[in-house]
Image (tube, coloured by chain):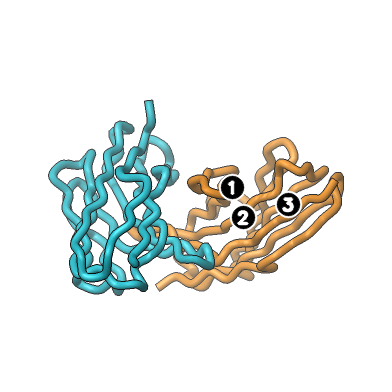
Chain colours: A cyan, B orange
Amino acid sequence: DTAVSQTPKYLVTQMGNDKSIKCEQNLGHDTMYWYKQDSKKFLKIMFSYNNKELIINETVPNRFSPKSPDKAHLNLHINSLELGDSAVYFCASSGREFGEKLFFGSGTQLSVL
Amino acid sequence: GENVEQHPSTLSVQEGDSAVIKCTYSDSASNYFPWYKQELGKRPQLIIDIRSNVGEKKDQRIAVTLNKTAKHFSLHITETQPEDSAVYFCAARGPGTALIFGKGTTLSVSS
């Protein structure tokens, strides 16, 4: 019964394609995030949503578009994939009831060929 | 925005030794400082955290200290074991902001 789940776990695709990653949390948290972890293991915030509203949008190309249909889901759509997009993408969530501790999903390894 | 520096980037110790990882942050409004452990191929997992109204916190073999004046915080692991080998990340967050991570420390514990 995974608290933060994301699919798919692995994604291999060609340059120029469009792909989506889905994330769901069953913790009742208000805030969800997308982080990118590059090959050097650096964890960088991309987006943050609070109750379906975008609150943080770091310097990310507009080929990346997050969508939050409800507060339990935050999906990431990437258009026109480039080689540099290859990374592990982690979804995460936090809530005031847990002292704002961040809980991560299991990650999606994206490989762009 | 917040910037978190973490040192060292790699740390090798013998089993039973202590390990210390240090971080500095830039935003004086930051008030929450967690530490995450990431094993190979796994998600980052919270191991300990500290808030700005506390100077030190301990949980068995791990402890964290915070110096708000100097904007430093550190992770201390005593009696290290091979299973402590992983990448450790410090992070900082202010009110209404996202967690900003340091670049990680790869800890290797040899038996």
Q: Are marks 2 and 3 in contact (CB under 8 Å)?
A: no
Question: The residue marked by circle 1 belongs to what chain?
Answer: B
- Dot 1: few (<14), some (14–19), or many (≥20) neighbours within 10 Å? some
Q: Label 2 vs label 3: CA separation?
A: 14 Å
Name the residue carrying label 1. Answer: B39
In front: A3, or B31? Answer: A3
Name the residue carrying label 3. Answer: B76
Q: In the image, what residue occupies the spot 34% across and 49% down?
A: A91
Disc nearer the start of the sequence (3/1): 1
The amino acid type found where label 3 is placed reads His
| Quadrant where the image shows the C terminus of chain B | top right
Disc nearer the start of the sequence (1/2): 1
Q: Locate residue B42, reporting x and y percent.
A: 51, 45
| Tag nearer the camera, 2 or 3 | 2
Q: Which mark is residue B87?
A: 2
In front: A99, or B109? Answer: B109
